[in-house]
Amino acid sequence: TVAIEGNTLTLSEIRHIIETRYAVPGKSLVEQNEVIGMHAAMKYVNTTLVSRIGTVTISDILEIHRRVLGYVDPVEAGRFRTTQVFVGHHIPPHPQDVEKQMQEFVQWINSEDAMSLHPVEFAALAHYKLVYIHPFVDGNGRTSRLLMNLILMQAGYPPITIRKEQRAEYYHVLEAA
């Protein structure tokens, strides 16, 4: 998932970082810290949230984000944005509206309507809705993909891996949605 965001580390380099906690010489420390953060967030999702079906909270999403971004930008990690951002042709909600939109999002994600959807549709919609709100300065895509995979795993599906080669198609589909 970090490759989609432009991270250039190879799979073997990522494995080395996760297994040893040693830096890969000649590679960006920011990219390496992104890997450590994603690993921490994935562990949190797998050990804490997968078993809690139907109870995703704003605190859970903030905690996922805190772990995703915590090694790269600890000041912004786990906090809603306070500035307006622009994402391609999309202008996300004003920062003053983010908390309300997130409350509505969490209410929807825990609703019977959402959970009555096919798990793949539910996961895709949750991913889209969170990316649309774009509640964070950075790490929205990674956090959204983790939430999408959480929903899939809670329903007994394996997590989705979006390969680097699918990056253009992935962003095209999000833009079209």
Image: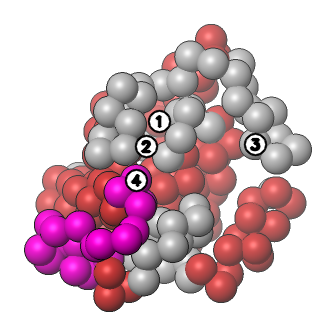
Graded by Cα atoms within 10 Å as few (under 14), some (14 to 19) or many (20 or more), the crowding at tag 4 reads few
Residues 176 and 56: in front is: 176
Residues 170 and 77: in front is: 77
Looking at the rendered structure, the kind of residue marked 1 is Val
- Disc 3 marks which residue? 87
**Mark 2 or 1: the one toward you:** 1
**Which residue shows up at 30% across the image and 41% down it?**
70
Secondary structure found at label 4 = helix
Percent x, y of residue 66: 32, 39
Earlier along the polypeptide chain: callout 3 or callout 4? 4
- Disc 1 marks which residue? 106
Are circles 2 and 4 on residues that touch, CB within 8 Å?
no
Q: Is residue 120 above or below residue 95?
A: below
The numbered disc on residue 110 is 2
Q: Is residue 168 above or below residue 48?
A: below
Looking at the rendered structure, the kind of residue marked 3 is Val
Q: Using the numbered discs, state the Cα–Cα distance from disc 1 to disc 4 in whole angstroms.
A: 31 Å
The answer to if 17 sits in the magenta stretch is: yes
